Amino acid sequence: MKRCLLLTFVLIMLCFHGFSQETFPINDVKDKRAKAYAFTNATVVVDHKTQIDNATLIIREGKIENVGQGLSVPVGYKVIDLQGKYIYPSLIDIYTNYGLPAVKRVRRSFGRAEQINSKTKGAYNANEAIKAEFNASEAFTASGKEAEKLRKAGFGAVLSFRPDGIARGTSTFVTLGEGTDNNLMLSSKVAAHYSFNKGTSTQMYPTSMMGSIALLRQTYLDADWYKGLQNKPFSDQSLNAWINTQNLPQIFDAGGWLNILRADKVGDEFGKQYIIKGNGNEYQRIKEIKATNAALIIPVNYPDAHDVDDPIDAEGVSLEDMLHWELAPTNLGTLEQNNIQFSITSHQTDGKKFWKNLRQAIKNGLSEEMALKALTSNPAVMINMQHKVGSLKKGMVANFLITSSKLFDEKNIIHENWVQGNRFILKSMDVKDFSGQYALIFNGNTHNLEISGEPGKHKTKIIVNDSTNIEVKSKFDQELVTFNFKPKKDEEGLIRLSGWKAGNNLKGQGQLADGTWIGWTANRTGDLEKKEDKKKKEGKEEEQSLGSVIYPFIAYGNPSLPGQEAILFKNATVWTNESAGIIGETDVLVKDGKIAKIGKDISDNSAKVVDATGKHLTSGIIDEHSHIAASSINDVATNSGMVRIGDVLDPESIHIYRQLSGGVTASQILHGSANPIGGQSALIKLRWGASPEELKIKGADGFIKFALGENVKRSRSSSSIRYPQTRMGVEQVYVDAFTNALEYEKKWNAYNKLSSKQKVNAEKPRRDLVHETMLEILKGKRFISCHSYVQSEINMLMKVAEQFGFRVNTFTHILEGYKVADKMAAHGVGGSTFADWWAYKWEVRYAIPYNPSLMNMAGVIVAINSDDAEMARRLNQEAAKSVKYGGMSEEDAWKMVTLNPAKLLHLDDRMGSVKVGKDADLVLWSDNPLSIYAKAEKTLVDGRVYFDIKKDEEARQALTKERARLVQKMKGVKKSGAPTQKSRSGKDVNWHCDDIVGHTILQFGDR
């Protein structure tokens, strides 16, 4: 009975095996031999935490049948004795484009008309960058050359996706074997992919990082709405695909730590925990990275040292780039120390560089156990493939490596890479190691012979003395050796020796140069002298003196953020901006980030005392119109109300520090003026070293940028086709936007009034981020700062606002404000202007330096702003110009850069004046703050000293020393023969209103 059952089972298995082949015709005699192997006497590393010594691994038909000690090998299995060798799971890379057609980028030429609508043919999304319908499995074709490269590096399976678009579609998981694509593909739709890069889309929108974020957010909302429609009014295959792939792992190609935070924020909003691909600088903000709870995909593509031999070239390399070059190898170790899950990708590194950099990471804190985990089980778990690959367990795909020693050993050799049970020999295991020192004896003479290098790449020479060597042409083939060399360095003729390995020694026969036959021996006398030991020791000492992570990770960053202090300013001249006016010889106590006391003879034993005798203490300068600390400023949709500057704050901007040195403590970061309706503002405090979210002023009202005039109607572009093209059209954009928002509100009100039962059969309205922003304005929840010049347009926008029942908050630039100051005062709008800019474009031809004073006299709240990173460092002097030109009082002039912008930004309840209970945003000046000789000696934000003129001097000296240290280290690396890169300038960007990143119409600054 048992025999009958066994026979039946065998027949079933044979039938199954035959069936699996039948869909592909075979132009040959069928070969039904089972691919059955037993690997014995090996050290098998099952996974990152399990190692079995003297073990046997049994595989059949590309699957692992068993692994362990003392296993009996079934009959018919080919036995491969791996005594002294190791077996590891083959590596997995989940960030590749393997087997997919290259993405062809399209560069837009200057002067080409904008493309407003999608040109993608078919029933797909309205935006070309949403390519969720793409399936990598449908485009995959195995690539022999690429597979071979990856196999040589130790990889056995990869996830492959197409790097094109903001929504990139799905990836496929394949092995790196040979055969039909059907057999290589382990899973077709594995993960859904996203990025901030619009890829090959030539459509105008989006052109900026914040536009990409807004498009992602809107697409999530659209997909949710589209999914819920019972009667779909149109077909969108992109949204269908998006909806159908939301249960797959979601992989986001972000890049550096800043974009990781941005991607995670989008994910949090829509309940998605992305797997995020970084770029290797995550150590710079490890606390924030850890807080995302995201699993990461990390490359080991470290930057080369800069060529800094020329001191001028060296000056062009930023401290950030120098420090990152030094600290990049610590990244993976830092992630491990912080218990952050990650996998490692070979992206942008060839096999040799990949292993070199990986071992460098291990020297810098990454454990070997975690390195293996990040290359095997972690990537498998991330994409739900742990039941197939990532370890060597029963039933799993037979993907494994055979190595000469431990995987991460410096001299380890990957001999073979088995993929789906198929053998790929990388370096023969039969190659012998002949390296060492020998006493070569022939013809009665003894010579010192040295064989160096790796097996298969040996180099041989005879050591005559310390300064003279005779090069030996050698050949090593299994156990056989051949040597050819000159009797002496300058003699003619060759001595030819042929022999074999005899234990640790060599021996054989040969001929002298005159043809005489001789016998010879080479007795091994020891290992090679490791001349590099001293260098390695010096290198280790050098490696240990690494720089520190600083916040922010640029020049003038600090090892830690400043803490709140109790500070008592004594005997200052205090500019209160309150009814007390300017009061002399006064004390101000700062505690817990607030102004605690103001008066004479204040004492507090817990406070640090600052002698302010002869100095002036003011509230911090507030810049109502700035573009610093943002990664992008403009997007190009006519109504870009859905984009948010708060999504793209960059706390690494050096302008934050520079403006602190000029007494600035808070700024409104505005969208540019490329559109009638621009993006939402970010109100920030200049908290040097803080994270993007920590820069924001919590609880601040929402603001938005509107714009009038030449910029929005594209006066300086002959190729633009975007509406509007006239000032009349601009007005219609506003009327249309607010009218549509009210219609949108009616739809939602009608839907929300339905009972739960009625909603079941009703179609839910589509959420629209643009309409929601316009409604916020109409409901007094968001406030307009409007770029403006010409009085006719200023009047127009006030009338539009009054027509819809709200008021414009601020006209910025407003260089013709003096003409309509009475109407502005009646409307209740403020003016944030320049002190004396004129004649830089046609629509400012009527600008006058008396403008701020005239508006102030008419009762308008007036502020002086910068719109320029450099000017913001001297807004105190810009305010002083109205004293000179307009006869304004010093107090009123000072209020234009402190209290008045606070009022325009609705922040005057907490900043803008020196008053008990307000935020301790203070500046200690060396002189009258309106004087050109005044210097900001200390700048406090929330009671923290973010700028101190004495510490700045110390920082400059420390910076010089640190740069010198790094320059010497880079020069040493170049001297050792390592590759270097040319120096390049840093990222010191000075944005203005109409800088359009990524767009063909690059206009001048907002002047």
Image (tube, rainbow, N blue to C red):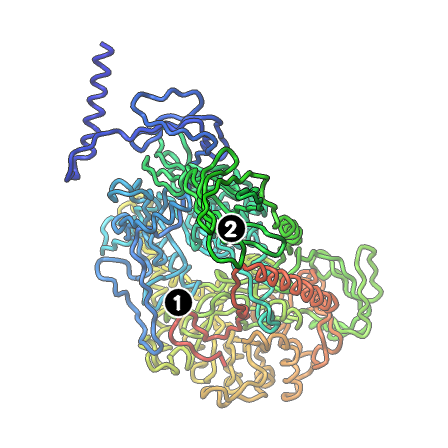
Element marked by disc 1: loop
Residue 191 in picture, x, y percent from top left: 35, 46
Relative to the observer, which residue lies in front, 726 or 246? 246
Relative to the observer, which residue lies in front, 812 or 1005? 1005
Task: Indicate the amino acid at tag 1.
Answer: Thr
Label 1 crowd (10 A; few <14 / some 14-19 / many >=20): many
Left or right: 939 in relation to 226: right
Quarter holding the N terminus is top left
Total numbered labels: 2
Residue 439 in picture, x, y percent from top left: 57, 42
Disc 1 or 2, which lies upstream in sequence? 1
**Cα distance between the residues tagged 1 and 2:** 35 Å
* Residue displayed at 42% across by 76% down: 1002
Relative to the observer, which residue lies in front, 967 or 503? 503
* Residue displayed at 26% across by 40% down: 183
As drawn, 176 above or below 671: above
- Residue 709: image quadrant is bottom left
> Which one is closest to the eye, mark 1 or mark 2?
2
Q: Are marks 1 and 2 in contact (CB under 8 Å)?
A: no
Label 2 crowd (10 A; few <14 / some 14-19 / many >=20): some
Left or right: 388 in relation to 628: left
Task: Indicate the amino acid at tag 2.
Answer: Asn
As drawn, 881 above or below 208: below
The label number, if any, that marks residue 521 in the structure image: none
The label number, if any, that marks residue 357 in the structure image: 2
Residue 248 visible here: yes
* Residue named by callout 1: 207
